[in-house]
Image (cartoon, rainbow, N blue to C red):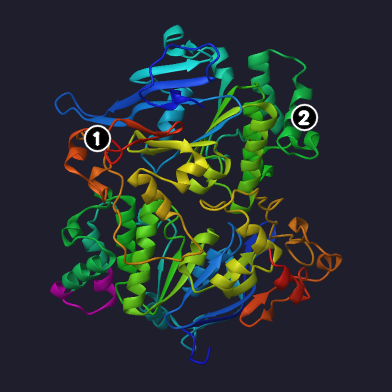
């Protein structure tokens, strides 16, 4: 990427200090998000994807500590920002839609007021302007204006989720972080909202960091994606490329964990075993105890993220050297 | 599978029929006051069969009545009307009030949340020993426990029997729940979203286990899910539900290849499709499931249906058989 990325994360380390010892939740993670790009982080629970999102906005709570790395937003270091700068960065620079955000609305205040609250706190808008902006935001996310006076309990889950997205968009952020924004919703509503997000993004031009455990959904919505396992990015490439040519055995396993509604029915294996304990992770490649292609070297030395094809990065010993795997495909 | 799946089929109990035969099962919840009567039509006229060695998938969005169906069959709640036949016996007649021990042995249930369904103070072995003790009265239940744990994939099983739930992962706990259901040698297992709370990489393991139990032990499963792809994966037949009604039923592959009901088509179009990507800007049915309180007459899908006709708002369509095993309730298929 020649132009400056919106967000650039380099060698990020985050630990959770637990009574049993530190858990390495995020381990040397680097990626960047370009202007207008939808970047995805996919992985199972506990792989560190939400921790990264929280690190970007600096809303991690103890016992989590960022122990190393840089997070640059438009070239500016986020981790060393002062109170004022971080206040300005949140909402305007980057805004977040949290997991099960639809339950985060205040039940005793109308949703319109909750949108206007954000505007009141963060802008100098007059009340009439705030109202106008709230109406505009509702229109953007596809809710009728008259619903501004509704209380959260009067709305369906899908509609509440739209309200939360409207709030996140209130100050025109350059980066929208969405942590499993549709996981609690029904499939039809999920599809509706994802389409809407994509449309709004194309109109307003912000970038998105999209987090989900659903790889097929991720391939659908994101331009590029990173697959995370036990706090590390194990594969990073264009989403279509990951879908068509997964190289890391974990990625291959994840993709074969989703049955399809079309085509030949085939036996899917999933991945044997369970994700590792992050306090005492396995030596070498953290995936090796579950890996069907494990080689002796993996138990000794951790593989490093390497560019194996243009723009396609993989951290694995298995499958290297590459040409055979790429040709053999799975 | 025969015509008996159809909600209109009316025949007397046939001895050689399917293990579980559900006829016109309905449940209404009264949530109003004396002055303002409000009825929630959670389930209306559910009619289907589940045979031994068969997986029937029940698919729909939240509020479509899937879980209510399972709860009625397990008799955790009593139906408003309808009949449940187990091996030809009308159980609501022969054992009104509460289910007999024999019925509860024959019909077991696995729940969605493997974290909430195990007792944290009991060992894994005790969880499985208890139903054996209650239903089979055996003192020598220990050996059975180890066998069952091995069946559901624990290795070494004896070691796991001594563990507590907190020492197990979600997938392992769900395997314990399955072993516990198997302990009483049931005919039918009702599995209510058994994998939706598990990590994606271990879901297939549980689904494959269900398939294996179906094939090797001849257990019938009612697999409840919101995920069409997994319904196709393990369901021999799939029934699509909408707002408490069954709207379409067919052999799973046929249902997804040739869906007839507009709602089935809508559900299929909403499944993430990595090949095609997110298609934007087309006009298809949108919106959400309607309120189940005091439903108007007619097809419940009419307000969202892209092909809605006048007749749809007036009357609930009858069942139309498109082929022997494929039926649909929609006025487009009169």
Q: Earlier in the sequence, mark 1 or mark 2?
A: 2
x then y, percent, for residue B327? 39, 34
User: Taking A74 as reference, is A172 above or below it?
Assistant: above
x then y, percent, for residue B148? 73, 29
State yes or no: residue B101 in magenta: no
State yes or no: residue A119 in magenta: yes
Q: In the visual, does B274 lie left or right of A242?
A: left
x then y, percent, for residue B47? 40, 25
Q: Residue furthest front?
A: B323
> Which of A90/A133 is in front?
A133
Displayed quadrant of residue A163: bottom left
Q: Are marks 1 and 2 in contact (CB under 8 Å)?
A: no
The chain holding disc 1 is B
The chain holding disc 2 is B
Query: Residue at (69%, 67%) from the top-left corner?
Result: A329
Q: Residues within 10 Å of mark 2 (few under 14, many from 20)?
A: many
Query: Residue at (43%, 24%) from the top-left corner?
Result: B72
Q: CA distance from mark 1 to mark 2?
A: 48 Å
Displayed quadrant of residue A228: bottom right
Query: SS at mark 2?
Result: helix
Q: Is residue A36 visible?
A: yes
Query: Residue at (44%, 23%) from the top-left corner?
Result: B4
> Which of B317/B235 is in front?
B317
User: Taking B148 as reference, is A276 above or below it?
Assistant: below
Give the numbered dot on residue B146.
2
Magenta residue span: A118-129
Magenta portion: prevailing SS class: helix
Q: Circle 1 is placed at which residue position? A: B293
């Amino acid at each position: 990427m020649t132009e400056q990325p919106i967000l650039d994360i380099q060698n990020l380390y985050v630990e959770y200090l637990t009574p049993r010892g530190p858990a390495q939740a995020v381990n040397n993670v680097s990626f960047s998000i370009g202007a207008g790009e939808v970047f995805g982080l996919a992985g199972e629970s506990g792989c560190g994807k939400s921790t990264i999102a929280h690190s970007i906005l600096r809303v991690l709570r103890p016992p989590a500590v960022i122990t190393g790395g840089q997070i640059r937003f438009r070239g500016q270091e986020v981790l060393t920002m002062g109170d004022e700068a971080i206040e300005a960065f949140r909402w305007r620079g980057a805004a977040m839609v949290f997991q099960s955000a639809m339950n985060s609305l205040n039940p005793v205040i109308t949703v319109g007021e909750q949108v206007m609250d954000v505007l009141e706190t963060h802008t100098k808008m007059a009340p009439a302007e705030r109202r106008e902006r709230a109406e505009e935001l509702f229109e953007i996310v596809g809710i009728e204006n008259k619903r501004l006076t509704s209380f959260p309990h009067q709305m369906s889950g899908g509609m509440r989720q739209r309200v939360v997205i409207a709030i996140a968009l209130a100050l025109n952020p350059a980066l929208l972080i969405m942590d499993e924004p549709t996981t609690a919703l029904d499939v039809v509503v999920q599809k509706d909202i994802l389409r809407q997000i994509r449309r709004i993004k194309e109109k307003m031009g912000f970038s998105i960091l999209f987090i989900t455990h659903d790889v097929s959904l991720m391939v659908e919505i994101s331009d590029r994606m990173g697959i995370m396992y036990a706090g590390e990015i194990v594969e990073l490439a264009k989403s279509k490329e990951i879908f068509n040519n997964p190289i890391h055995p974990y990625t291959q396993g994840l993709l074969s964990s989703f049955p399809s509604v079309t085509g030949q029915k085939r036996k899917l294996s999933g991945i044997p075993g369970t994700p590792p304990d992050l306090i005492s992770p396995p030596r070498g490649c953290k995936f090796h105890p579950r890996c069907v292609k494990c080689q002796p070297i993996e138990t000794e030395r951790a593989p490093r993220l390497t560019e194996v094809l243009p723009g396609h990065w993989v951290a694995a010993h298995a499958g290297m050297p590459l040409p055979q795997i790429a040709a053999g495909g799975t | 599978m025969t015509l008996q799946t159809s909600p209109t089929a009316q025949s007397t109990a046939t001895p050689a029929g399917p293990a579980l035969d559900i006829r016109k099962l309905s449940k209404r919840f009264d949530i109003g006051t004396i002055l303002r009567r409000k009825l929630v039509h959670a389930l209306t006229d559910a009619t289907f069969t589940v045979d031994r060695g068969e997986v029937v998938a029940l698919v729909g969005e939240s509020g479509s009545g899937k879980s209510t169906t399972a709860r009625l069959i397990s008799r955790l709640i009593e139906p408003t009307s309808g009949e449940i036949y187990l091996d030809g016996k009308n159980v609501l007649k022969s054992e009104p009030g509460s289910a007999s021990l024999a019925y509860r042995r024959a019909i077991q249930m696995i729940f969605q949340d493997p974290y909430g369904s195990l007792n944290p103070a009991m060992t894994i072995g005790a969880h499985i020993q208890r139903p054996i003790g209650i239903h089979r009265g055996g003192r020598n239940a220990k050996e059975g426990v180890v066998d069952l744990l091995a069946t559901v994939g624990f290795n070494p099983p004896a070691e796991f029997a001594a563990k507590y739930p907190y020492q197990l992962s979600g997938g392992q706990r769900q395997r314990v729940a399955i072993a516990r259901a198997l302990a009483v040698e049931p005919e039918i297992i009702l599995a209510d979203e058994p994998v939706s709370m598990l990590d994606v990489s271990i879901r297939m393991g549980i689904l494959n286990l269900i398939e294996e139990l179906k094939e090797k032990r001849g257990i019938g499963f009612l697999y409840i899910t919101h995920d069409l792809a997994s319904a196709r994966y393990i369901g021999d037949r799939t029934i699509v539900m909408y707002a408490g009604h069954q709207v379409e039923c067919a052999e799973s592959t046929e249902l997804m290849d040739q869906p007839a009901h507009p709602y089935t088509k809508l559900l299929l179009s909403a499944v993430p499709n990595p090949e095609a990507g997110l298609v934007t800007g087309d006009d298809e049915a949108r919106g959400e499931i309607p309120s189940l309180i005091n439903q108007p007459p007619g097809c419940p899908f009419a307000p969202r249906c892209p092909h809605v006709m006048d007749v749809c708002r007036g009357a609930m369509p009858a069942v139309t058989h498109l082929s022997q095993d494929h039926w649909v309730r929609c006025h487009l298929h009169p």
